[in-house]
Image (cartoon, coloured by chain):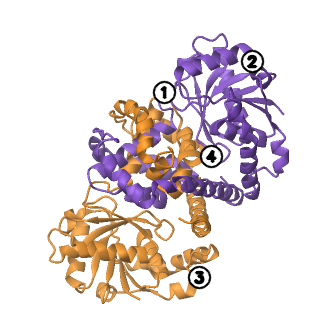
Chain colours: A purple, B orange
Amino acid sequence: MAKVAIVGSGFIGRAWAISFARAGHDVRMWDQSRAATGGARDYISGVLDDLASNDLLRGQTVDAVLDRITVVAELEEALAEAVHIQENTPENLDVKREVFSLIDALAGPQAVIASSTSALLPSKFTDHLEGRHRCLVVHPINPPYLIPAAEVVPAPWTSTETVERTSAFLVDAGHAPLVMQRELDGFIMNRLQGALLEEAFRLVADGYASVEDVDIGIRDGLALRWSFMGPFETIDLNAPGGVRDYVERYQTIYSNIFPQMLRRVDWAGEVMTTVEADRRKRLPKASLGDRQVWRDRRLMALAAHKKKSDREFGK
Amino acid sequence: MAKVAIVGSGFIGRAWAISFARAGHDVRMWDQSRAATGGARDYISGVLDDLASNDLLRGQTVDAVLDRITVVAELEEALAEAVHIQENTPENLDVKREVFSLIDALAGPQAVIASSTSALLPSKFTDHLEGRHRCLVVHPINPPYLIPAAEVVPAPWTSTETVERTSAFLVDAGHAPLVMQRELDGFIMNRLQGALLEEAFRLVADGYASVEDVDIGIRDGLALRWSFMGPFETIDLNAPGGVRDYVERYQTIYSNIFPQMLRRVDWAGEVMTTVEADRRKRLPKASLGDRQVWRDRRLMALAAHKKKSDREFGK
């Protein structure tokens, strides 16, 4: 299989390494800090054990996947012959510009160079590069070995071939790429999340709903169908004649609400006292770490469930 | 157990009947149209079979639950001794006002009278009633026997006791009530859904994303965590110091996007051509019915999965 380079071995880099090695690729991971890569393989080995016990390794053994991940000491060694390079350094524009200069200078012409950034537009850190046509953003939701969606975001100069190759590469690795036509702040997922959160904070700030009410409405309500259909298919199936029929019947409800969405509430302002008090009452700060472990286990069980349901009922 | 009356035996009325009978209540269902109630028990029996095979009947047999549902010929008979009355007539203000007048006049003083309306504020159809203090909205997401969330919406004159009794009644029946402090257009869930859809339609209208990209971003991305945590708990666990830390780190991303959310796209306008073409390419109109059956099976499998995960890992 292809050679893949992971630059930066924090949580996101490690998670990508797992996903790409599971797909059969030969993964080389490099970090400027030796300390960072030190525990990487042990950490990865633990995750692979969990994935194996949820039947999420494509029928492979832990060792088979782990054997495909090598931590290397030199960046050149990681990049040699790589066809896909996934960069995961800190979300700092100067750092990204420098790292991309380095990678573009060292990588062979066959390589696509992708950044995991969630916040920076690709045009901001690739404009100066000779190989800027092969650069783009591939933004995951963490952890990508459990959450298939990944945003593919081209800069204005990213070639169509680069976008297409990257998209195919991701699909082959079991991902579900969202291929943007052009870059935009927040990409797609953070914009959708942001729109929903703006209304959630407004409802709490205005005293209509509690933090827990909002979470109930999503986790015990809307997100059940969304988790296997998405919002457009959901409304397409919610009227006898499909999505156009739905909009003809119900748009008035939404357009009447819209004028109340033009006001932004500062999330860090007064409402944060309410939000934080509610969250800390349910989950003390000292328990955040345990709850993250719980989240990852539930996410893994859900991924296994979806895989089973896809087989049983179809996607 | 308590006696429950279902007024109106369409899909929502039948679904409530299933949920309340499963909880052990003696359910009496009435509809002004005899034709509507005709097939109701056969339909319910089929749903109960599916629920039983997914272990979603609280360990009871289909017959045990079905035996608790009686279709009655007279409204008085349905309401007699009922402690909870769930109204499910058409979303028409005049109809609701008339039906509520009738129910309030006939129901004993022990009864709470709840409407399933998704669009009408309770103050609009209960202001004229002697028993308006015992009237409110209990709005489900269909079908309530699979989706626990239900919005409890008081009118300004609804008594605290009515709200509290209704909330406890719902919890006892396995529901997850969102208890609004006061009424508001769209309640909570349609407002959250609306906010997300507004951004989804904007992204498609502006050519940044396809309909399918949006659905991927939710069903293979954001909604996975949302489906067992909700959006507030999700961000609470996405920064080392919890929700305040998250907002301090990332609010700028969202506040920068917000000005682009002040423009509304008419969902039925030009964008609908794109949305409908994309949906109909993936799912021809003739297949909408089959796909709804698929949706209900997936939803049932997901409900069973969540129940199992709640037991195994905790809620």
Disc 3: which residue: B59
Q: CA distance from mark 3 to mark 1?
A: 51 Å
Disc 4: which residue: A147
For the residue carrying disc 4, how many other residues have a C-alpha within 10 Å: few (<14), some (14-19), or many (20+)?
many
Asked whether residue A203 is in view, the answer is no
Q: Nearer the viewer, residue B74 or B104?
A: B104
Q: Nearer the viewer, residue A255 or A54?
A: A54
Q: CA distance from mark 1 to mark 2?
A: 27 Å
Q: CA distance from mark 2 to mark 3?
A: 61 Å
Q: Nearer the viewer, residue A59 or A306?
A: A59
Q: CA distance from mark 1 to mark 4?
A: 22 Å
Disc 1: which residue: A184
Q: CA distance from mark 3 to mark 4?
A: 33 Å
Secondary structure beneath label 3: loop
Secondary structure beneath label 2: loop
Q: Is B283 displayed left or right of B229 in the figure?
A: right
Q: Is A20 displayed left or right of B23 in the figure?
A: right
Disc 2: which residue: A107
